[in-house]
Amino acid sequence: MEQEAVRALNRDIVTCTRCRLSRDRINAVPGEGPVPSGLLFIGEAPGRNEDLTGRPFVGRAGAVLEELLSSIGLERCSVFITSIIKCRPPGNRIPRKDEIAACAGYLGRQIDLLSPEIIVPMGRLASEQVFSHFGIPHGSLGSIHGTVFHSSTPHRQIVIIPVYHPAAVTHNPLLKGAVFEDFRVIGKQLQKKERSGRNNPGSED
Ligand code: URA
């Protein structure tokens, strides 16, 4: 049932004309991964390779994301990957406030349908958007990255772990250690959930 709803949502996204970004896109990039999905990774906006292919994180940032996932024993096909903005901003400029707002409903529907246990916003804009969605005050990303926040959806308790954006590593190699450390926190949280699942068969946390 969720699969059909996600297909309908993707159709809405690829035909969307809610903001100026729809005029220049080759492809909108709804995101990809299992439905439902325990883990939802949310980036900022598609770049050139994503616009060309319609798939999220297939360029250099995608290679770093795959390396980060692999460092905690995950393959990209086991998690859902999307971004707050579904169309590429021209020249890869930073998404504008009204563009983020125009796309916010799509991200909200994805969160509802995928019903993730862990949400990982990557980078400042994604982190601000996810915190605003859940009504959590946002500090600077420098002070909150790698921290575990608790919230809930109508379906379940969830954990939000903001991390630096994988592209940050390609721009600033000094951040590499910090990003891997952020992902270690995600790995620990997954182990915790696995252990509590084993101790409480039937429990969802
Ligand atoms: N960076 C993002 O935030 N999203 C993508 O899809 C690709 C790069």
Image (cartoon, rainbow, N blue to C red):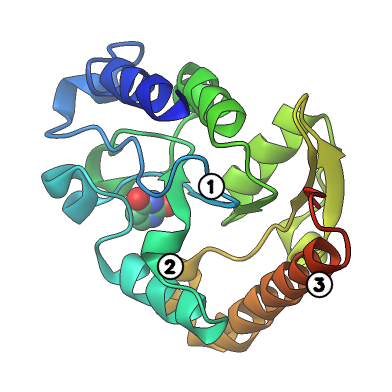
Which of disc 2 and disc 3 is earlier in sequence? Answer: 2
Distance between the alpha carbons at the discs numbered 1 and 2:
24 Å
Q: Can you tell which quarter of the image residue 95 is in?
A: top left
Q: Is mark 2 within 8 Å of ligand 1?
A: yes
Q: From the image, tell me which residue sits under label 3.
A: 195
Task: Look at mark 2 in the image and give the residue it sits on.
Answer: 167
Q: Say whether disc 1 or disc 2 marks the residue closer to the N-terminus.
A: 1
- For image coordinates 43% across by 67% down, the residue present is 167
Could you classify mark 1 by the number of other residues whose Cα lies within 10 Å: few (under 14), some (14-19), or many (20 or more)? some
Other residues around mark 2 within 10 Å, as few (<14) / some (14–19) / many (≥20): many
Q: Secondary structure at mark 1?
A: loop
Q: Which mark is residue 202?
A: none
Q: Which mark is in front, 3 or 2?
A: 3
CB atoms of marks 3 and 2 within 8 Å = no
Q: CA distance from mark 3 to mark 2?
A: 32 Å
Left or right: where 159 falls relative to 92 = right
Q: Which quadrant holds residue 45? A: top left
Q: Position of residue 6 (x, y in %)?
A: 40, 26
Residue type at mark 3?
Arg
- The residue to which callout 1 is attached is 37
- The spot of residue 69 in percent (x, y) is 49, 74
Q: Residue at x 60, y 82 (%)?
A: 180
Q: Nearer the viewer, residue 142 or 8?
A: 8
Q: Earlier in the sequence, mark 3 or mark 1?
A: 1
Query: In the image, residue 37 lies at what x, y percent?
Result: 53, 47
Answer with left or right where residue 26 lies relative to residue 99.
left
